[in-house]
Image (spheres, grey):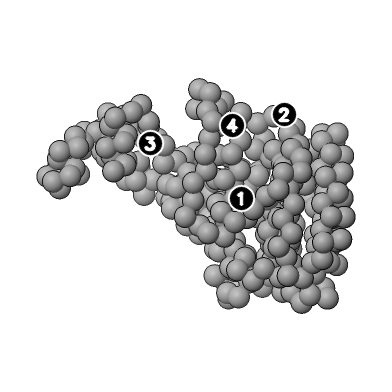
Amino acid sequence: HLKENISKSDIRINGLFGILELCEKDGHFLNDKYRDFKYRLDFFEQIPNKHLNKGNYDFRRDFHLMKEVPDFANANSFYEKLSILQLSYCCLLKIRQLALKSTKKNNAKSNIDAFTQWMVNDLGLMLGIEYKLAMSVLGGRTEFRKMIGLDDKSSSAKQKIKGSVWDIFHSRYCMHNTNISKHLGENISAYFVTNDYNLFILLSKYSLTGILDPGDDSGTTSWYNTDFDYPHLDDDFLEKSTKKMLNLMYDRLKVNFQYDKKKIDNMISTMEKENGML
């Protein structure tokens, strides 16, 4: 069905996000694996429907290389190249660090306040999606524990967190129409579609309160909305924390944020140790 719909329209496949995630292993980017995925997607677009539907094809025999895909520079981890991934990774490590100490109801409010102040004082940036995840995990929504690998062994948790960070980045990028339009060279009204139920709930259960846009292409456009479905939190706390977050986000827009790689690397190293990942 996908092939038929593509054939009848001008839709183009851009599998870059999915491919990048699959080609990351142990802090290195696997260029050979990346090229193999990219060439197979190109082949999917090239092959006529009648041959695809009948299975009458052989990739190695029938694929014609039009342009070779170059290596990523130095084949280093793209996690280390994209600042927003590192910042988001920091946030999820912090959420897990707090949750490991306690996810009980009597600690929920203080944990959320601690996370908020950590974003303000240490990270220096307010990230709305990550804040919503912190509210969910620390506020008693147990289904979100797996996004930070809270019940996994430390070695598995690290990979689980990286996967969640990538999913958040993917969703943030695809919901930022200005950003994606700039990079694709055309005006785009983007829709983000996912079969990840937790990610869907994290992004969709909103009652719009405000939109805060820094007006650049940093990928950190933030909105904050109120969802009152947290077992450990009462309505009064949620209303106050929502107003507090909106004010903090507004104040941060007045500050010229400068990404400090050395600082963030040190924070990651410290929190990985505190999460038992090193």
Q: CA distance from mark 3 to mark 2?
A: 28 Å
* Helix, strand or loop for disc 1: helix
Residue drawn at (28%, 32%) of the image: 7
User: Mark 2–mark 4 contact, CB under 8 Å?
Assistant: no
Name the element at disc 4: helix
The x, y position of residue 17, in whole percent, is 48, 44
Q: Residue at x 49, y 46 (%)?
A: 193
Q: Nearer the viewer, mark 1 or mark 3?
A: 1
Residue 251 shown left or right of residue 222 in the figure? right
The front one of 182 and 229 is 229
Q: Residues within 10 Å of mark 3 (few under 14, many from 20)?
A: few
- Residue 13: give its label: 3
Marks 1 and 3 in Cβ contact (< 8 Å): no
The crowding category of the residue bearing disc 4, from other C-alpha atoms within 10 Å (few below 14, some 14 to 19, many at least 20), is some
Precedes in sequence: disc 4 or disc 1: 4
Residue 172 x/y as whole percent: 61, 43
- Residue tagged 2: 215
Q: Is residue 256 above or below residue 247?
A: above
Which callout, 1 or 3, points at the residue further toward the start of the chain?
A: 3
Marks 4 and 3 in Cβ contact (< 8 Å): no
Give the left or right position of residue 172, taking residue 186 as reference.
Answer: right
- Judging by the rendered image, the residue that carries numbered circle 4 is 177
Q: Where does label 1 land, which residue?
A: 204
- Give the CA separation, mark 2 to mark 4: 12 Å
Q: CA distance from mark 4 to mark 3?
A: 18 Å
Which residue type carries mark 1? Ser
Along the line of sight, which residue is nearer the eye, 254 or 191? 191
Point out the tag, 2 or 4, that comes first from the N-terminus: 4
Q: Amino acid at mark 4?
A: Asn
